[in-house]
Amino acid sequence: MVGVLNIPKLPLFSPFSMCKQSRSFVSIKASSESSNSQANPASTSTKEDQKPSFASSSTATTFAPPPNFKPPEPKRFAVRPDKTWDIVGAALALFFRWGTGVFVSGYSASLVSENEIPPGQYCLELGGSKVKETSKIGPRPEKPIEIYEFEGYSNFLFFFPCLMLVREIVAVLDLDVLFYPCPKNGPNFRPKAAQIGGKQQFPYMVDPNTGVAMYESDEIIKYLVGKYGDGSVPFMLSLGLLTTLTAGFAMIGRMGKGSSYTPSKLPPKPLEIWSYEGSPFCKIVREVLVELELPHIQHS
């Protein structure tokens, strides 16, 4: 089979219109967690006067396979033919962003003997030894951080790399985040963001653990590394204009995806997804979640 790739002329884009600068398996399930805290219209706030309208429950959820369910058989890894170019486009970020968002803060790996790994704990084996992976992450938030955002495009002419940068730091810090997708013309969370924050500007972050709420990707990144990291902004997120430009180029391969609303039915509770920003396989799944405006808790 012969594949032909047509590369159109790239449209003009503006990576500065909305911001100042500031892992391939995916699993989704229903969750009983949701938001109970919001913020006032100020850029930064410690008040929690408003409550979101999204359903919240502390009742444990029981999962069971549907009738006649047959577990899938293990298969050799392969990319579905009709998704090849989607994966290629989404993988551009690995090149332009030097793998930012692939590894957590302080990640390291070393070969150890088998008895150093607890029984039942998964790890990679190499020549009779096992790979021990470690990281240096900060305090864990009790409740998921809440972020209102979309994939980064408002249309084919304008896109906003600042949204991607916040998702990268979420992966680096290994944080659980409740994402409220705000695609263009979305009827639910885009108006909600304007209601609780005072304006439709993205990304908009609410930390229900502290009551802090803020706009601007650079301020959000600094806050998260200060509160849940070691205080140091990762190299590829600290280069100013170069950070913005490389993030913009990284998004070109997915032009317009994950930003416009597709009619859907909201789930009674947020979905859960195990993924990370640096994976092209996770990227194309999250694009659909955003287009359908499905709130989801992401476990990095």
Image: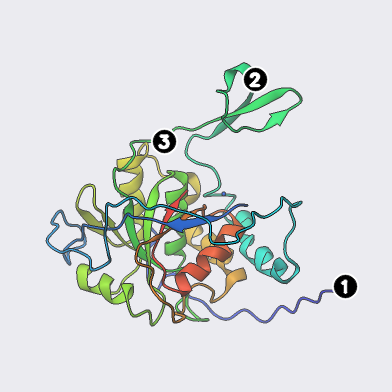
Camera-side mark, 3 or 1: 1
Residue drawn at (47%, 78%) of the image: 158
Q: Is residue 149 left or right of residue 10?
A: left
Image position, residue 120 (x, y; %)? 57, 28
Image position, residue 12 (x, y; %)? 54, 80
Q: Tell me the amino acid under the disc marked 1.
A: Met
Badge 2 element = helix
Looking at the picture, does residue 34 appear above or below residue 6? above
- Cα separation, mark 2 vs mark 3, equals 25 Å
Q: Tell me the amino acid under the disc marked 3.
A: Ile
| Neighbours of disc 2 within 10 Å: few (<14), some (14-19), many (20+) | some
- Cα separation, mark 3 vs mark 1, equals 47 Å
Along the polypeptide, which appears first: circle 1 or circle 2?
1
Residue pointed to by mark 3: 137
Is the N terminus in the top left, top right, bottom left or bottom right quadrant?
A: bottom right
Q: Nearer the viewer, residue 243 or 101?
A: 101
Along the polypeptide, which appears first: circle 3 or circle 1?
1
- Outermost residue to the right: 1
Residue pointed to by mark 1: 1
- Cα separation, mark 1 vs mark 2, equals 45 Å
Residue drawn at (42%, 43%) of the image: 173
Residue drawn at (63%, 52%) of the image: 24
Badge 3 element = loop
Image position, residue 146 (x, y; %)? 32, 57
Image position, residue 221 (x, y; %)? 36, 51
Residue pointed to by mark 2: 114
Q: Tell me the amino acid under the disc marked 2.
A: Glu
Along the polypeptide, which appears first: circle 2 or circle 3?
2
Camera-side mark, 2 or 3: 2
Looking at the picture, does residue 63 appear above or below residue 196? above
